[in-house]
Image (tube, rainbow, N blue to C red):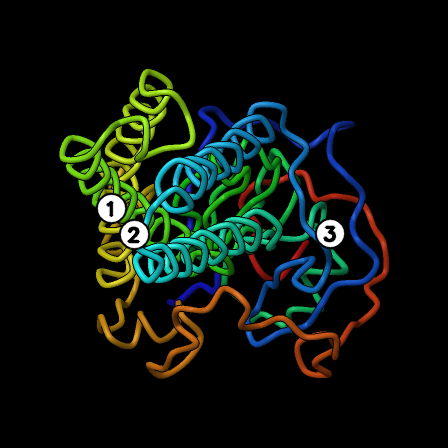
């Protein structure tokens, strides 16, 4: 007997009970192809978490620091105009794409389930068959879709949640995994580019006069380059590992939290290439590398269709069997 919703334990340990802390059901719930949908796919999404906001700001500041050193220490003082133009254009393009990917990963709903929809009226609207079972999250009082997990930072159940990343101040889930992959890829590329330029600049300064190879004093130049080299090496290793981990998760159709909790093999897995197409929004094309795909001012009448559900009391049971009593 198949169930539309898979039994998944929460990210947070322990299970609570429905009570005064449970939120009331949302009266308007988007309808999509799935049985249980994300609640705010078209709305602006931002997590007000102090740690995450600080980490996100630090990420941008580190990119701006690299931008400063690359432009004002290495490229502008260079006597080779073509070298400066080519490397400046390449670095700034990659940096822009990295920050755009970071912004999309941070401000895109990762696949949050509507809060407080564990009501009799909502479950009846799903038109489930007798004998089927659905599961309620005791923390956000929502009906948990298959492969959804509760995030204690976002305070929501997230569909296909991989992990919560403080550097993007968001969960990495079904809707924003592509942008997180692009962010790690572009950060790795600009880190590698920085390291290569630092090596060439050191060689250039050793062969020439140190006072002429930079607009800053030799000690300041050395300190700025060493700090950039350390930053580039650290983030090249970190983001390369994260990029490989995310691509592996997509190809194996297993999220990081599913592997951690041993929940693999409880669903029908799809082939690697099909999983990549689903994650990146269609057949292989240059749009795979663009963080701007999916941006539109027009509303999709299919994905944004809304129905009104009568507001009701939250069901107390965590395991709900159809038909309802």
Name the mark on residue 189.
Answer: 2
- Distance from the alpha carbon under mark 3 to that under mark 1: 52 Å
Q: Quadrant of the N terminus?
A: bottom left
Horizontal arrangement in the rendering, residue 234 relative to residue 104 (left or right) = left
Q: CA distance from mark 2 to mark 1?
A: 5 Å
In this orientation, does residue 134 appear?
A: no
Residue 69 x/y as whole percent: 41, 35
User: On the rendered structure, is 228 left or right of 169?
Assistant: left
Image point (85%, 54%), residue name: 311
The residue nearer to you, when weighing 150 against 189, is 189
Compared to 91, does 3 lie above or below?
A: below
Between discs 3 and 1, the one toward the N terminus: 3
Residue 310, picture quadrant: bottom right
Q: Position of residue 198 (x, y in %)?
A: 25, 38
Looking at the rendered structure, the secondary structure element under dot 3 is loop
On residue 30, which mark appears? none
Q: Is residue 29 left or right of residue 89?
A: right
In the rendered structure, the answer to whether residue 176 lies left or right of residue 220 reads right
Residue beneath label 1, please? 192
Q: Earlier in the sequence, mark 3 or mark 2?
A: 3
Dot 1 falls on a residue whose secondary structure is: helix
Q: Position of residue 247 (x, y in %)?
A: 26, 57
Q: Residue at x 57, y 47 (%)?
A: 106
Please give the residue where the numbered disc 3 appears in the rendered image. 119
> Which residue: 32% across, 49% down?
79
Label 2 crowd (10 A; few <14 / some 14-19 / many >=20): many
Mark 2: which secondary structure? Answer: helix
Q: Residues within 10 Å of mark 3 (few under 14, many from 20)?
A: many
218 versus 201 height, above or below = above
**Circle 1 crowding by C-alpha within 10 Å: few under 14, some 14–19, many from 20:** some
């Amino acid at each position: 007997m198949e169930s539309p919703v898979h039994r998944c334990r929460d990210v947070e340990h322990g299970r609570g009970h429905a009570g005064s802390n449970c939120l009331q059901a949302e009266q308007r719930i988007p309808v999509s192809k799935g049985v249980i949908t994300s609640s705010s796919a078209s709305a602006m999404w931002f997590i007000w978490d102090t740690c995450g906001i600080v980490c996100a700001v630090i990420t941008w500041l580190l990119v701006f620091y690299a931008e400063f050193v690359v432009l004002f220490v290495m490229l502008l003082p260079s006597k080779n105009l073509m070298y400066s133009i080519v490397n400046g254009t390449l670095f700034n393009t990659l940096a822009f794409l990295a920050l755009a990917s970071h912004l999309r990963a941070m401000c895109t709903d990762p696949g949050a389930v509507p809060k407080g929809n564990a009501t009799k009226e909502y479950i009846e609207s799903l038109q489930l068959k007798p004998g089927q079972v659905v599961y309620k999250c005791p923390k956000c009082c929502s009906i948990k879709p298959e492969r959804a997990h509760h995030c204690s930072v976002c305070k929501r159940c997230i569909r296909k949640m991989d992990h919560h990343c403080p550097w993007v101040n968001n969960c990495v889930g079904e809707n924003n995994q592509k942008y997180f992959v692009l962010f790690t890829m572009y950060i790795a590329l600009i880190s590698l580019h920085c390291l290569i330029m630092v090596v060439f600049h050191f060689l250039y300064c050793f062969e020439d006069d140190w006072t002429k190879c930079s607009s800053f004093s030799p000690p300041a130049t050395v300190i700025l380059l060493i700090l950039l080299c350390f930053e580039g090496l650290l983030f090249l290793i970190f983001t390369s590992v994260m990029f490989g981990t995310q691509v592996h998760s997509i190809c194996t159709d297993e999220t990081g939290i599913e592997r951690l909790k041993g929940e693999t093999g409880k669903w029908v897995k799809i082939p690697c290439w099909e999983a990549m197409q689903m994650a990146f929004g269609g057949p292989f094309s240059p749009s795979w590398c663009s963080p701007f795909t999916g941006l539109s001012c027009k509303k999709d009448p299919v994905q944004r269709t809304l129905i009104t559900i009568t507001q009701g009391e939250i069901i107390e049971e965590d395991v709900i069997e159809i038909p309802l009593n």
